[in-house]
Image (tube, rainbow, N blue to C red):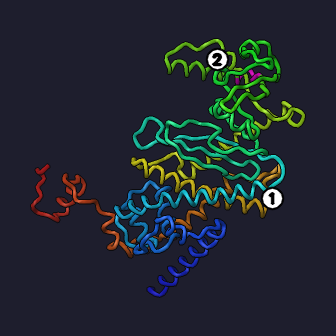
Amino acid sequence: MESSTKETAAKELALLEEHWTRLEQDLGIDLEDSARTYHALMRAREIKSGRDLLRVGAVFGLQDWSYPQIAGWAKLAGIGELSGPAVRQRLLNMEDWLRFLISTILKQRCGTLNCQPGWKVRLQDATTVSRPGSTGTDARLHVEMDLANLCVTGLQITDAKVGESLAHFEAAADEIRVADRGHAFASGLGPVLRHGYLVVRINWQNLPMLTATGERLDLIAWLKTLDHPTEISVQLDTPQGRFPLRLLASPLSADKAEAARRRARRNAEKKHHQVSEGTLLAAGFLLLVSNLPADLWPMELIFWLYRLRWQIELQFKRYKSLLQLAQLRVLDPTLIQICLLCKMLVILLLDCLVSQVRLQQPTWFADPQRPVSLWRLTQLLWAALRNAIYGCITLRRIFALLPALESTLRSAPRRRQQQLAWALAVLDQADPSFSFFVC
């Protein structure tokens, strides 16, 4: 029996080694050297390799576990003997290393994508993250995604004070940035208009524009004249200068327009102010600005391009469902950053795996009749990646190592008796000094 258990453990370790060897090859990064260079792995006492340290960080980012629970998992996974405080300290040492790994992967990826010919469509959005018990936003994750290759090309973690902006990521001449109205501010549009192209949805108030002759545009008066998709030429003043733009407006269907007006009324009620006529009128239109050349990009094509922005929303839904992207259990601001960095690194690893599938089976992704389900594919790849992170933790191994897990499973000495433990001690007569009348 003992020899069979050892053989099974050896096979599991060999399979785990194979998984991580492949992942390291995909990343093109030496985890050992980089971990030591960035002082994440200074003394290989219990955690003896960069791989194992990265697994500890991934478990911290992905699981709602306490530090002692992570220490118990590390024992079961064969990583080493760690205490809860030791796990916390190891995580605190990882921040610079995680930033290096993420930036290196993104640089390699962008370098490869930039060599591809043609237009590059980059979708940009952000999502908020809150600490336990928080009623507001504690951190904001800004993401840029390449549409054609279905992968993340830019990541930035900020605090709640930093809002959405196209300026978070550097623009290139052959890129088209597509974003929602949260990004429609002159300060963020200027850097992109200076170097690249954009398609951005706007509100009727947050982007003051000028007519082609330099006069202030009365957007509401213009919308009142429209009953079909229309565009006009406008100008926009930004900190980087004045730029010509195309302003496009498309009336929404009656049901969608009414739903948008209901949302506007609800938002006004929450803020205790009266909704304006201009807001109700503009709610019935899809308003876009773009600087794409009209001879290559007619109005209908720009509306179609903006609708593709929904793909980044679907990507966020997948990440939130599989990786608990919006869930945090830590309160310390530094550990919030580390937790999000660990989640981001796992997202980049998943992207690498999806890209490999796309290279092997390109027709799956471009078949309009039977396209591949990205949700099912990502779920399947995540199951394999999760096994590489967590290892094979069997019931037999848990029960065999129960004595060694005592320090990670039992609570610290308590000032107040736990009700259940006290009741069990009395019922089992483990301690005759207890009395039923003792509170």
The residue that mark 1 highlights is: 362
Residue at 71% in and 38% down: 192
From the image, state whether disc 2 or disc 1 is nearer to you.
Answer: 2
Q: Nearer the viewer, residue 226 or 259?
A: 226
Callout 1 crowding tier (Cα within 10 Å): few <14, some 14–19, many ≥20: few
Is residue 229 visible in the rendered image? The answer is: no
In-image side of 104 versus 252 (left or right): left
Residue at 72% in and 14% down: 218
Amino acid beneath label 1: Pro
Task: Name the N-terminal-most of marks 2 and 1.
Answer: 2
State the image coordinates of residue 204 (x, y, percent, origin top left).
Answer: 67, 21
Q: Is residue 395 magenta?
A: no
State the image coordinates of residue 89 (x, y, percent, origin top left).
Answer: 38, 61
> What secondary structure is marked by label 1?
helix
In-image side of 132 versus 320 (left or right): left
Q: Residue furthest bottom?
A: 3
Which span of residues is magenta-colored? 251-256
The residue that mark 2 highlights is: 279
Callout 2 crowding tier (Cα within 10 Å): few <14, some 14–19, many ≥20: some
Is residue 412 visible in the rendered image? The answer is: yes
> What secondary structure is marked by label 2?
helix
Residue at 65% in and 23% down: 260
State the image coordinates of residue 167 (x, y, percent, origin top left).
Answer: 64, 39
When the figure is inspected, residue 196 is found, relative to residue 430, above or below; the finding is above
Residue at 82% in and 52% down: 366
In-image side of 223 versus 10 (left or right): right
Q: How many marks?
A: 2
Amino acid beneath label 2: Thr
Label annotation for residue 220? none
Q: Nearer the viewer, residue 24 or 250?
A: 24
State the image coordinates of residue 48 (x, y, percent, origin top left).
Answer: 46, 74
When the figure is inspected, residue 348 is found, relative to residue 275, above or below; the finding is below
